[in-house]
Image (tube, grey):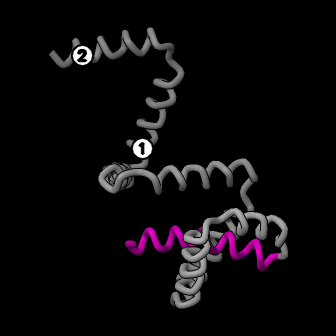
Amino acid sequence: MNRRGFLQGSFFTFIFSGSLAKGQSNEASQQWSQLSEEDKKQVEERWQKFKNLPPEEQRQLRENYQDFQRLAPERRRTLIANYRRWRKLPEGRKQQLRQKFNRWRKLSPERQSLLRQRYRTWVSLTPEQRSRLKERIRARRK
């Protein structure tokens, strides 16, 4: 497992372990009982690895956990669902998405803003409007 995967996994392990530590034992116990033996072993291993991280990395994970806990429950569920979908992606697709994200981060704030606005416009169009716009763009490129 690469370091990014370990830290992401540790974050979710920390969330789970934090539930136990914060006295949310009923929910955490129920979640724990629903885990497979393999998953339980993985959580325990990541918890041990977390405890061996440098203090600064532990601090950062704790801050991430606190930020996560402050989110609305629906937002937390969405993030967890997205994380699970991400984990299921083939490594090649993950790499493509990382490259696209890195390209996005290199854009100026002005360019990012322009692209966000264009995206909002695009999603507000009807399918017919999108189709006409695609045709106009194709015609310009010829």
Mark 2 lies on a secondary structure that is helix
- Type of residue at label 1? Gln
Residue 140 sits in quarter? top left
Front: mark 2 or 1: 2
Which quarter shows the N terminus?
A: bottom left
The residue most toward the left is 142
The residue indicated by pointer 2 is 138
Q: Nearer the viewer, residue 33 or 84?
A: 33
- Type of residue at label 2? Arg
Label disc, if present, on residue 112 of the rendered structure: 1
Mark 1 lies on a secondary structure that is helix
Q: For the residue carrying disc 1, how many other residues have a C-alpha within 10 Å: few (<14), some (14-19), or many (20+)?
A: some
Tell me which segment is drawn in magenta: 1-22
In the displayed structure, 18 sits above or below 55; it is: above
Rendered location of residue 57, percent (x, y): 53, 82
Rendered location of residue 58, percent (x, y): 58, 83
